[in-house]
Amino acid sequence: MTDFQRNLCWICGAMALIAVVMALQSRETAKPDRERRIAAVLIGTATREVAMACRELEEIDLKAKNLEIARQLGETELLNAFRKQIQEKEANTLDALSGYGEILRSLAEIERATVLEEFDRHAHHLVATKLFRQVQALRLVQEDYQKPGEGRGESLNLDAMRGRCREK
């Protein structure tokens, strides 16, 4: 993940948190509308984080294949370079998903019908704008949301997430 992508992630996350805080502080807005907007922001943020993690995990898999080729060729310098790139991408992926569990916990505090409605709205928006990879990520987020509380942290395991990204 480049510095630009990392900064963009932080900016998106900060914007999402600001939007949530502003929505919570707004007394003029009815509670259901405020919760709907919060759910929409949280779902959008989680979907972008999961989509980015899946892209990074695909790149890690490609780097692992290149690592094996370098090993077969006896290219020690390339071998070390690929190992370092894989480690960096794994760290970036964990970093991108660092707030994911908290987002799921926040969604769990909102009325279930409101959250499910926002999942549907977001899916329609993504299809309309032809962001199909994010539709797949949205499905993973919705699966995690619908899990009992204890299962919600599973996605932070890179191997489990890798398998789930491939399945979609």
Image: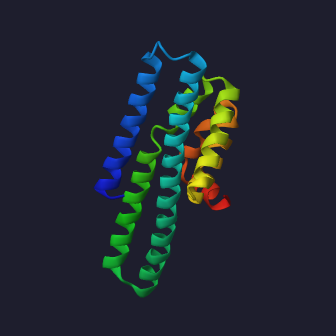
Look at 58% across and 45% down and name the residue there. Answer: 155
Q: Nearer the viewer, residue 54 or 71?
A: 54
Using residue 151 as the reference point, say whether residue 51 is left or right of it. left
Using residue 154 as the reference point, say whether residue 41 is left or right of it. left
On-image quarter of the N terminus: bottom left
Please identify the residue farthest to the top as the structure is shown.
27
- The image shows residue 83, relative to residue 120, as above or below, that is below
Q: Position of residue 105 (x, y in %)?
A: 57, 29
- The image shows residue 89, relative to residue 111, as above or below, that is below
Look at 39% across and 42% down and name the residue there. Answer: 12
Look at 68% across and 27% down and name the residue there. Answer: 112
Applied colour scheme: rainbow
Q: Position of residue 26 (x, y in %)?
A: 44, 17
Look at 38% across and 36% down and name the residue there. Answer: 15
Q: Nearer the viewer, residue 93 or 49?
A: 49
Q: Position of residue 22 (x, y in %)?
A: 41, 23
